Amino acid sequence: MKKVLIVDDEYLLREYVKCSVEWDRLGLSIAGEAEDGREAVEKAGKLRPDIIIMDINIPFMNGLEVSRRVKEILPDTQILILTAYGEFEYAREAIQFGAVSFLLKPLDPAELEKELENAARKIDSSISLEQQSIRVVMGDLPYSAQEFLTLLRGRKYEEAYAVIDRSFVLFEERQMSRQTVSYVTMDILVNFTGYLSELGVEISEKMSEEMAQMNPLACTAPAQEVKERLLAILEETVAPLEQRLVPSGRKKVSEAKRYIEENYWQTETGLNQIAEKIGVNPSYLSNIFKKEYGCSLSRYLIRVRMEQGRKMMEETPDITVMEVAELVGYSDAYYFSKSFKSQYGITPSKYLEERKIKKENI
């Protein structure tokens, strides 16, 4: 049954809409109602209706804005706009924001039923095309269930993550629908869960809940956000697993700290490079480093760079901000300045100015 959301600030009109159609015969069910635009957007996000029947003139947020916002999170939802004759031209604008049809008030039940049938056909057609799209996409993706499992079993976690990363880049490049993203996302999680089961690792209740949230997230959020959350789940699960497999964690943290202090000035210095140099998984290193020092490795690297930059400006007030930025590993003075102010509460240019004044007064 396809779900329908009815949006109108008039109770009697909502009741009239509900009584005007034989919903079961059309394969539809009323999932909910909303009295204004804000409630409509909120309920659309929660209920994820297939069809929305909505008055154009509703409080707080009109039908145009609701259409635009709903289409951002539910691009395949069909929207039918109800409008009075005087609002006809106004209603036309709703088409630009994804509304598929509009109906004049007073509402004709026969016209409403006709438009609902059209909307249902469009949904069915979209699903059919989506299924075809998934088959084509899966053939082109730099990802397969067997490859992913093979990499996991070989504990080549970074390579497995890279496969996922490349797949999501392809999603963005080809503007794949969120249903396709959802399909692949859940396929990855199923295979990952199977891998953990092979190792006898139990998934925590918290992690299980996070995995359960991935499907609705994949259907509404941008692919980049889905990828980041997916990788975070994998890394958070692998990190403690790796910690069990590598008992010399504290020694690795010391090696990472020493590497940062000796190579902070290199622009390429970062989590992945350091992990490669000391021979551990990046997610594992990130996890044990934070446990040991109370901050992330990336944050520690920034602190070291800022402290070294501050010392340079202290000792050489005539140096430029760009020169300091480059000497501590930044190719962009803007990001150096932003990080410096975040750590010391003052911009590096202001800090240099104060150093120069102090030097002149000595």
Image (cartoon, helix red, strand yellow):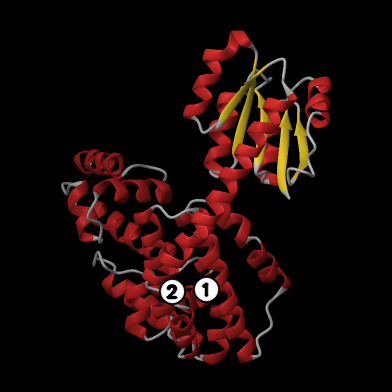
Measuring from the top left, give residue 342's x and y in whole percent.
42, 48
Tell me the element at label 2.
Answer: helix
Mark carried by residue 161: 2
Tell me the element at label 1.
Answer: helix
Mark carried by residue 235: 1
243, above or below 357, in the image? below
Amino acid on which disc 1 is placed: Glu
Measuring from the top left, give residue 117's x and y in whole percent.
65, 38
Is label 1 in contact with label 2 (beta carbons under 8 Å)?
A: yes
For the point 50% across and 65% down, the residue is 295
Measuring from the top left, give residue 325's x and y in whole percent.
24, 54
Q: Earlier in the sequence, mark 1 or mark 2?
A: 2
Question: Is residue 315 in view from this perspective?
Answer: no
4, above or below 37, in the image? below
Q: Quadrant of residue 237?
A: bottom right
Q: Quadrant of residue 99?
A: top right
For the point 34% across and 81% down, the residue is 276
User: Quadrant location of the C terminus?
Assistant: top left
